[in-house]
Amino acid sequence: MEKVTPKQILELINRLPDAESHIHICCIDGKHCVTNEWFAGNFAGRSFEADNYEDAAQQLIDYMYEHIGHNSMVGKSVSESGFPNLEKVYEYCKPKVLIEDEA
């Protein structure tokens, strides 16, 4: 399986509800931010900042690869989600409301 690209991870996040909470411009310094809260939750959440979304997304991707199998909240979320298989990650993160609507 090829490595996940910034474009792919941004497309995945944009498919989820509240995407604007996870991909946004920081109001303090104007940096482009991408968070991991959509899969790790608020408690283990982290924001990745860069001059553009692709670079911020690459930081997130690197962070996710580093945490595969890691004994932590983030590591558990990354591993359970099926990362780097983004379709599995989407299924893992997809809200139950969407699952019930599809039935």
Image (cartoon, helix red, strand yellow):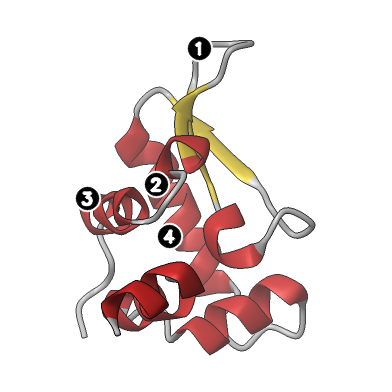
Examine the image and state in which quarter residue 100 appears: bottom left
Residue under label 3 = 7
Q: Which mark is residue 30?
A: 1
Q: CA distance from mark 3 to mark 2?
A: 8 Å
Please state the horizontal and vertical placement of residue 95, each as a whole percent of the image: 48, 68
Question: Please, what is the three-letter code of the amino acid marked with disc 3?
Answer: Lys
Q: Name the mark on residue 57.
A: 2
At label 2, which amino acid type do we have?
A: Ala
Q: Earlier in the sequence, mark 1 or mark 4?
A: 1
Q: Quadrant of the N terminus?
A: bottom left
User: Looking at numbered disc 4 in the image, what kind of residue is underneath it?
Assistant: Ile
The residue drawn where x is 45% and y is 28% is 24
Q: Position of residue 15 (x, y in %)?
A: 29, 55
Q: Are marks 1 and 2 in contact (CB under 8 Å)?
A: no
Do the CB atoms of the residues marked 3 and 2 lie less than 8 Å apart?
yes
Q: Alpha carbon of mark 1 to alpha carbon of mark 4: how far? A: 21 Å
> Taking 46 as reference, is 55 left or right?
left
- Counting from the top left corner in percent of width and height, residue 81 is at 49, 82
Note whether 36 is above or below 66 in the view shown.
Answer: above
Amino acid type of the residue tagged 1 in the rendering:
Gly
Residue at numbered disc 4:
61
82, 52: nearer the viewer:
82
How far apart are the alpha carbons under marks 3 and 1?
21 Å
Circle nearer the viewer, 1 or 4: 1
In the rendered image, residue 49, in percent from the top left (x then y), is placed at 53, 32
First along the sequence among labels 4 and 3: 3
The alpha-carbon separation of the residues under discs 2 and 4 comes to 6 Å
Judge the density around disc 3: few (<14), some (14-19), many (≥20) Cα neighbours within 10 Å. few
Q: Is residue 43 visible?
A: yes
Please tell me which of labels 3 and 1 falls first in the chain: 3
Q: Residue at x 60, y 75 (%)?
A: 67
Q: CA distance from mark 4 to mark 3?
A: 11 Å
